[in-house]
Image (cartoon, grey):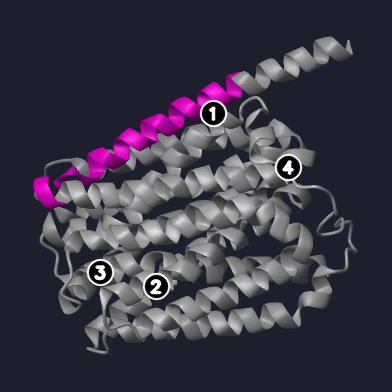
């Protein structure tokens, strides 16, 4: 029963990851066909992330009412509808319209499942959870690359992904009775109670430090996802159809890092996983930015950057109950994700706007700045949490 439940959770995260790399893979072709500006991809990602901010802040209330299972099933179905809408869009404004349910659904799924796994499973399962997000993110660039290479159009790529998500949503709806059972030591999925307000959450010591950390991480990750293919095409001179496939290298690195990271996560601990991951991120960024004429170094750098990003998100999420208390984790995880998606909302379009005037060559330097901010904020959080624990021990003593 437990194995089946965690398998369904992983399947849902594949569905969550499928749309995340599609836009970046297809945009070099889409913006030309739709006769719109290159930088307008940032507007779509702003709508994506704006929806996730809203739904993340409301996730505590939604999940308390519907439960994690139904929340997830509805969310994946909404993602499928969004991708189907994209496949039938013939103008930029239509993409913007269908981006709204995408963002709202993604934030709800993300918060509900991350909190559930953080509370009921060990670090390795959290790392593996996010590796399955990587499975979805890796598959979709190849779907889009195949569609473009075989002259099927970017619309076919989006339609194919929407049909995969419909299948996943159907399995989740069928399995809803399983979520209501809690054999094998799994506690009830939700416990009724009053949701915490945003001011109450922000008054918890350390929360104001984790928010910019999540902001920085998702700013770096989202900017990489959106502009990697454009960087390869415009800065490195790689053909568009080929670059769409190479864009998956970042996701291969993330997926592999999260899968293998699951085997060591419990032994290494969340803090050390974050520290080592940021160091690997910086190494990958340096490889991408080196001014050499060999494209292979940048391609390897994308894999290394993906490896570095791999365990940051799951490690921060999994440490939430330990850092702030299990009773506060659901509400705090929702706010953390709102902070994360604020970075996803504003930073990729900012990079696109800057690239309009300076060129896409600024791309790796932009990401490096956020990697350094992430390292600073997480280390400050560690000190704050340690001081909180010392004060608690003295008061109890």
Q: Secondary structure at mark 2?
A: helix
N-terminal label among 4 and 3:
3
Query: Which residue bears the numbered disc 4?
Result: 196
Marks 1 and 3 sit apart, C-alpha to C-alpha, by: 34 Å
Q: Is residue 153 left or right of residue 5?
A: left
Closer to the camera in the image, 74 or 224: 74
Q: Is residue 23 left or right of residue 257?
A: left
Q: Secondary structure at mark 4?
A: loop
Task: Indicate which label's residue lies in the foreground, 2 or 1.
Answer: 2
Q: Which residues are magenta?
A: 356-383
Closer to the camera in the image, 64 or 397: 64
In this rendering, the answer to whether 170 lies above or below 96 is below
> Which label is found at residue 209?
1
Estimate how packed mark 3 is, as few (under 14), some (14 to 19) or many (20 or more) residues with alpha carbons within 10 Å.
many
In this rendering, the answer to whether 112 lies above or below 314 is below
Q: Residue at x 85, y 54 (%)?
A: 192
Estimate how packed mark 1 is, as few (under 14), some (14 to 19) or many (20 or more) residues with alpha carbons within 10 Å.
some
Estimate how packed mark 4 is, as few (under 14), some (14 to 19) or many (20 or more) residues with alpha carbons within 10 Å.
some
> Which label is found at residue 27?
3
Can residue 360 be seen in the rendering of this structure? no
Task: Indicate which label's residue lies in the foreground, 4 or 3.
Answer: 4
Task: Indicate which label's residue lies in the foreground, 2 or 3.
Answer: 2
N-terminal label among 2 and 1:
2
> Which label is found at residue 97?
2
Q: Secondary structure at mark 3?
A: helix
């Amino acid at each position: 029963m437990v194995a089946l439940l965690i398998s369904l959770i992983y399947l849902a995260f594949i569905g969550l990851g499928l749309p995340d790399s599609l836009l970046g893979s297809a945009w070099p072709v889409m913006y030309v066909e739709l006769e719109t500006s290159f930088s307008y991809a940032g507007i779509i990602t702003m709508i994506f992330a704006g929806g996730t901010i809203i739904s993340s802040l409301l996730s505590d209330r939604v999940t308390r009412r519907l439960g994690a299972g139904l929340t997830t099933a509805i969310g994946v179905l909404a993602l499928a509808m969004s991708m189907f809408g994209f496949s039938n869009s013939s103008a930029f404004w239509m993409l913007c319209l269908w981006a709204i349910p995408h963002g709202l659904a993604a934030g709800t799924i993300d918060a509900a499942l991350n909190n559930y796994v953080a509370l009921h499973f060990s670090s390795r399962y959290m790392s593996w959870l996010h590796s399955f997000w990587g499975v979805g993110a890796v598959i979709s660039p190849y779907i889009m690359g195949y569609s473009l290479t075989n002259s099927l159009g970017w619309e076919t790529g989006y339609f194919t992904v929407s049909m995969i998500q419909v299948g996943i949503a159907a399995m989740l709806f069928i399995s809803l009775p399983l979520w209501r059972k809690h054999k094998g030591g799994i506690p009830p999925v939700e416990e009724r109670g009053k949701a915490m307000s945003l001011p109450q959450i922000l008054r918890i010591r350390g929360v104001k430090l984790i928010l910019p950390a999540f902001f920085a991480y998702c700013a770096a990750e989202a900017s990489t996802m959106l502009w990697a293919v454009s960087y390869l095409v415009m800065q490195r001179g790689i053909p568009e159809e080929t670059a769409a496939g190479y864009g998956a290298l970042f996701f291969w690195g993330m997926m592999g890092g999260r899968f293998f990271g699951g085997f060591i996560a419990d032994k290494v601990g969340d803090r050390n996983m974050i520290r080592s991951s940021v160091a690997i991120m910086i190494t990958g960024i340096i490889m991408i930015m080196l001014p050499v004429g060999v494209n292979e170094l940048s391609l390897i750098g994308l894999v290394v950057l993906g490896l570095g990003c791999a365990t940051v998100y799951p490690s921060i999420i999994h440490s939430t109950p330990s850092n702030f208390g299990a009773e506060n984790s659901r509400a705090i995880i929702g706010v953390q994700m709102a902070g994360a998606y604020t970075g996803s909302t504003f930073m990729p379009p900012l990079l696109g706007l800057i690239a309009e005037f300076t060129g896409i060559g600024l791309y790796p330097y932009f990401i490096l700045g956020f990697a350094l901010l992430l390292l600073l904020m997480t280390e400050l959080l560690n000190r704050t949490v340690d001081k909180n624990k010392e004060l608690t021990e003295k008061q109890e003593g």
